[in-house]
Image: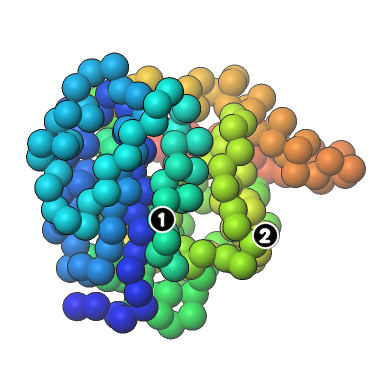
């Protein structure tokens, strides 16, 4: 089933992802919505990930790119965004996977007039498994900044805005990228279904709570440069919702 909105460009950054990248790519190949193109960007992996995907990812809808130097996830996604010409963009981390109707459901929302579409998701780690749900049909910009819902970046699908959004190399660059989309679109449609399995691999820098808190405070200062009241208002919300999330999923 296709919604005839056009091709969706899918950005998959990859670094030493030999063990998981085929699972991610296969979850795209298995989509019921078939009008897509993958941009699989190797970020100067030190293992044989590049040779591995060159051998196994032979679908003509897959474009494999490779950085000459290691750029990090943010700038590697920018490589994909700059290479992609499609009017709609989705992101998928190389260790996550989509359910088969993910793009079909999201493109239906885009066809109906939504500009930014996310979804509930399933969280998997070595010790835990739980669903992360929002429970409302739309996430407004203000509630996003308050971190009332922790967006899984592999659930993001959006219409490219008039004002281009690229990643900035800062801590929590995903949050800043999404903030700039929310700044233009004001809200995101939330599909009340787990469309992604998010795998926590155990070495994510954002799992360091002290570092994550400092990054987030620095981002709020960057966003609200001349308004310290807003900075600390949203920072308190960030802390409160972080505690509530932890208590709910401990």
Residue 14 location (% of width, % of height):
32, 33
User: Percent from the top left, x then y, of residue 248?
Assistant: 44, 40
For the point 57% across and 65% down, the residue is 161
Residue 188 location, x and y as percent?
52, 64
Left or right placement of residue 39 versus residue 174 in this view = left
Outermost right residue: 226
Nearer to us: label 1 or label 2: 1
Tell which circle, 1 or 2, labels the residue nearer the N-terminal end: 1
Residue 197 x/y as whole percent: 27, 46
Is residue 173 in view? yes
Per the image, the residue denoted by label 2 is: 183
Quarter of the rendering occupied by the N terminus? bottom left
Residue beneath the point at 49% across and 74% down: 114
Q: Does dot 1 land on a helix, a strand or a loop?
A: loop
Which of the 4 image quadrants contains residue 213? top right
Left or right for 154, reference 75? left
Which part of the image, by quadrant, shows the C terminus? top left
**Which residue is outermost to the top?**
46
Query: Secondary structure beneath disc 2?
Result: helix
Q: Residue furthest front?
A: 68
Give the camera-side residue of 204 and 23: 23
Q: Residue 133, can we see it?
A: no
> Is 146 left, or right, of 105 in this rendering?
right
Query: How would you rate the neighbour count of disc 1 (Cα within 10 Å): few for under 14, some for 14-19, many for 20 or more?
Result: some
Is 124 drawn above or below residue 47 in the view shown? below
| CA separation in Å, label 1 and label 2 | 22 Å
User: Residue at the spot x=23%, y=51% of the render?
Assistant: 62
Q: Mark 1 points at which residue?
A: 84
């Amino acid at each position: 089933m296709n919604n005839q909105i056009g091709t969706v460009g899918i950005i998959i950054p990859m670094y030493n992802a030999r063990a998981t990248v085929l699972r991610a790519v296969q979850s795209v190949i298995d989509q019921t919505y078939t009008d897509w193109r993958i941009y699989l960007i190797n970020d100067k992996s030190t293992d044989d990930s590049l040779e591995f995907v060159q051998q196994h990812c032979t679908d003509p809808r897959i474009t494999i790119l490779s950085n000459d130097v290691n750029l990090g996830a943010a700038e590697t996604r920018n490589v994909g965004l700059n290479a992609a010409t499609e009017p709609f963009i989705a992101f998928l981390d190389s260790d996550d996977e989509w359910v088969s109707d993910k793009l079909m459901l999201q493109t239906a929302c885009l066809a109906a007039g939504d500009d930014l579409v996310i979804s509930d998701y399933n969280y998997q780690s070595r010790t835990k498994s739980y669903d992360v749900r929002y429970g409302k049909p739309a996430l407004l910009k203000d509630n996003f900044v308050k971190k009332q819902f922790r967006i899984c970046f592999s659930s993001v699908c959006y219409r490219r805005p008039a004002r281009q959004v690229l990643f900035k190399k800062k801590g929590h660059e995903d949050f800043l990228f999404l903030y700039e989309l929310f700044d233009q679109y004001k809200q995101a449609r939330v599909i009340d279904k787990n469309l992604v399995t998010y795998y926590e691999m155990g070495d994510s820098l954002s799992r360091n709570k002290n570092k994550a808190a400092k990054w987030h405070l620095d981002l709020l200062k960057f966003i609200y440069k001349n308004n310290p009241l807003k900075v600390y208002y949203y920072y308190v919300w960030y802390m409160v919702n972080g505690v509530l999330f932890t208590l709910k999923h401990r």
